[in-house]
Image (cartoon, rainbow, N blue to C red):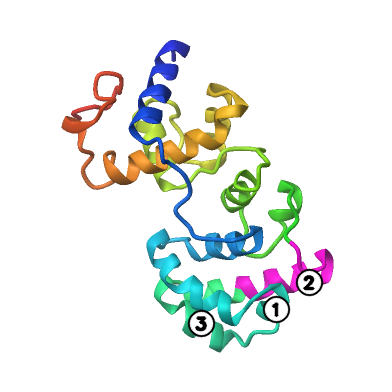
Amino acid sequence: MQKTKISRILAILSRAYPEAGISLSFENPFQLLISTILSAQCTDKRVNLITPALFAKYKNAKDFANAKQSELEKHIHSTGFYRNKAKNIINCCKMLVAHYWGKVPLSMQELVCLPGVGRKTANIVLSNSGIIEGIAVDTHVARVSRLLGWTKSKNPLIIERDLMRLFSKSDWHLINALLVWHGRRVCVARKPKCGMCLLKNLCPSAGR
């Protein structure tokens, strides 16, 4: 794909969504890590509704590590898959306490070894901590990237690699935010709003 076309798309999306950024509410990397684990198969809005009370009760990794799973499940029930999430959060925090003094390690290699943490979650935590090692690929990023012709894969790791080749490292965090916002507002999963899309003359999938 021509670099000029990619640059135009990036510029258009940047103008359309100047406020684009993460929607999860958090005060530090630890809260972001827990919130991102909870956001799997759940909206950020729903996660933001429960985390104030959650973080008031469980203030740090030690609190979560010592939590009763049944009690934690009650707090996070509305996020879906709550049993697995509760188990992962408790085990993740046990590892943080045992190996990292309760702090979140800020390296890809260490983060992906934590229970419940994959490369997407690690990228979100790192990029919002000022450390750029890759591009977080969620369902919106994957879908919009394929429609724009930036990748042919459905594998998040391959999609990430394809995007990393197309964009400068300085834009990796930005392109994630822009594609997420565009995917939520215009290029929606069930029926993309191609007629109102600012990229319709640049997108090979427009109108299909």
Residue sitting at 52 percent across and 29 percent down? Answer: 163
* Within-10-Å neighbours for mark 1: few <14, some 14–19, many 20+: many
Q: Main secondary structure of the magenta part?
A: helix
Residue type at the position of mark 1: Ala
Q: Verify CB contact (< 8 Å) between mark 1 and mark 2.
A: yes
**What is the spatial separation of the Cα atoms under label 1 and label 3, in whole angstroms?**
14 Å
Q: Give left or right: position of 29 versus 205.
A: right
Residue interval drawn in magenta: 88-103
Give the labeled residue for mark 1.
65
Res. 33 image quadrant? bottom right
**Three-letter amino acid code at disc 2?**
Val
Question: As displayed, is residue 127 above or below residue 172?
Answer: below
The residue at which mark 2 appears reads as 97
The relative height of residue 133 versus residue 53 in the rendered view (above or below) is above
Residue at the image point whose x is 65% and y is 38% from the top: 132
Q: CA distance from mark 2 to mark 3?
A: 21 Å
Residue position for label 3:
73
Q: Amino acid at mark 3?
A: Glu
Residue drawn at x 57%, y 40% as measured from the top left: 157
For disc 3, the neighbor class at 10 Å (few under 14, some 14 to 19, many from 20) is many
